Image (cartoon, rainbow, N blue to C red):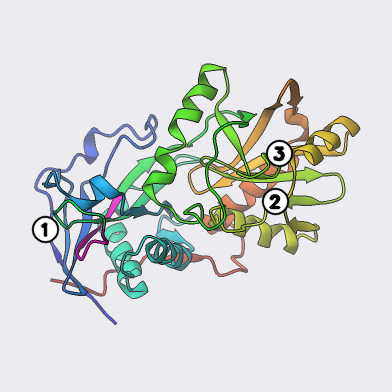
Amino acid sequence: MAYQFNVNKTKHSRLPAVDFKNIPFGRVFSDHMFEADYIDGAWTNLNIRPVEALAIHPANLALHYGQSIFEGMKAFADHEGHPVLFRPEMHAKRMNASAARMSMPDIPEDLFLQALDALVSLERDWIPTEAGSSLYLRPLMFATDEYIGVAASQTYKFLILALPVGPYYSKPVKLIVEDHFVRAVVGGTGEAKTAGNYAASLLPARLAREKGYDQVMWMDAHEFKYIQEVGTMNLFFVFKDKIVTPATDGAILKGITRNSFIHILKDWGYKVEERPISIHEVADAYRTGNLVEIFGSGTAAVASQVSLLTFGDMDMHFDESNWEMSLKLKHTLEQIRHGLVDDKFGWVVPIAHPVEMA
């Protein structure tokens, strides 16, 4: 289905004032955003308009009961300067999976993809060309009913914001194994990209930073034994004979960068295991020299090397001379995104002119 979008262009672009060589992550917004409303069982009021504050009633259900989900994805410029998206259909499917878990309506995949296409087409000059930079896209849906009472909203707002960004992590990360707080349990909302999951991680992350770490490594909620993920990344463990990543068992976000890395690794002929992996297995492998590297994967981080992992009184240090796998994966993914190598997986989607703009 082809959707028609009303477009209200800004009269005063902020683009000339942006220093693309020095962009703080998440602080600089493009001129326009996409907006739609879910009313009477249908998505309506399909608009692209200047970014501005929203008027929210104090009884908004999302503020009180947390019906809010989002995605994180990126647009790039290929080697010829044309804007492209990376696996947008996967993000559409994951957002709808989050919506189902939070008792929220589906966003038709055609609407999701055409809205992205239209917004990025309009904001193509906001795509940075510096190495490691991109136009970060934030689809967001939240409840808009105005009353006090625990119930699913009947109305919702769907937005897409665009932000030029540089690298999320500018250096390798230091992690500490979390042995008190938990992130998610099987049957909970761990697989959903919902706001409350991230709010619950803020205190443990702050306590970790106060100890000199960048993030926590989350364990399972029952035994504090099996590794889940980091707050902003899925995890990969590179052993001498295999690569292991925790299985997505219902408590772990199904990362799209994670999925991409698994496809690339298998295409290269590596043995990749998706299974439960305990922190004791990791510690034992480190002691014997069988553990070569740990890295995280995510849309924002891409591939981030772990330089230190602390488990109790044990510090596991990882030297940059052993970061071959994560660097190779990151480089390959960047090459695919920018059209510098063959996209054998069909992941890169060129931006076309919007189907219809009113």
Mark 3 vs 1, N-terminal side = 1
**Mark 1 vs mark 2, CA separation in Å:** 45 Å
Residue at mark 2: 245
**Mark 3 vs mark 2, CA separation in Å:** 10 Å
Does 301 sit above or below residue 268?
A: above
Amino acid carrying label 2: it is: Thr
Which residue is at a point 82% across and 38% down the rendered structure image? 291
Q: Splitting the image into 4 quarters, where does residue 256 fall?
A: bottom right
Amino acid carrying label 1: it is: Asn
Query: Is 65 in front, or is 193?
Result: 65
Does 112 sit above or below residue 203?
A: below
Residue 156 part of the magenta-drawn span:
yes
Residue at mark 3: 294
Which residue is at a point 37% across and 73% down the rendered structure image? 109
Bounds of the magenta segment: 151-161
Image location of residue 139, percent across then percent down = 33, 55
Q: Quadrant of the N terminus?
A: bottom left
Nearer to us of marks 1 and 2 is 2
Mark 1 vs 2, N-terminal side = 1
Image location of residue 173, percent across then percent down = 60, 29
Relative to 322, 18 lies left or right: left
Query: Is 41 in front, or is 9?
Result: 41
Q: Disc 2 on helix, strand or loop?
A: strand
Residue 344 part of the magenta-drawn span:
no
Image location of residue 95, percent across then percent down = 40, 62
Mark 3 vs 2, N-terminal side = 2
Residue at mark 1: 8
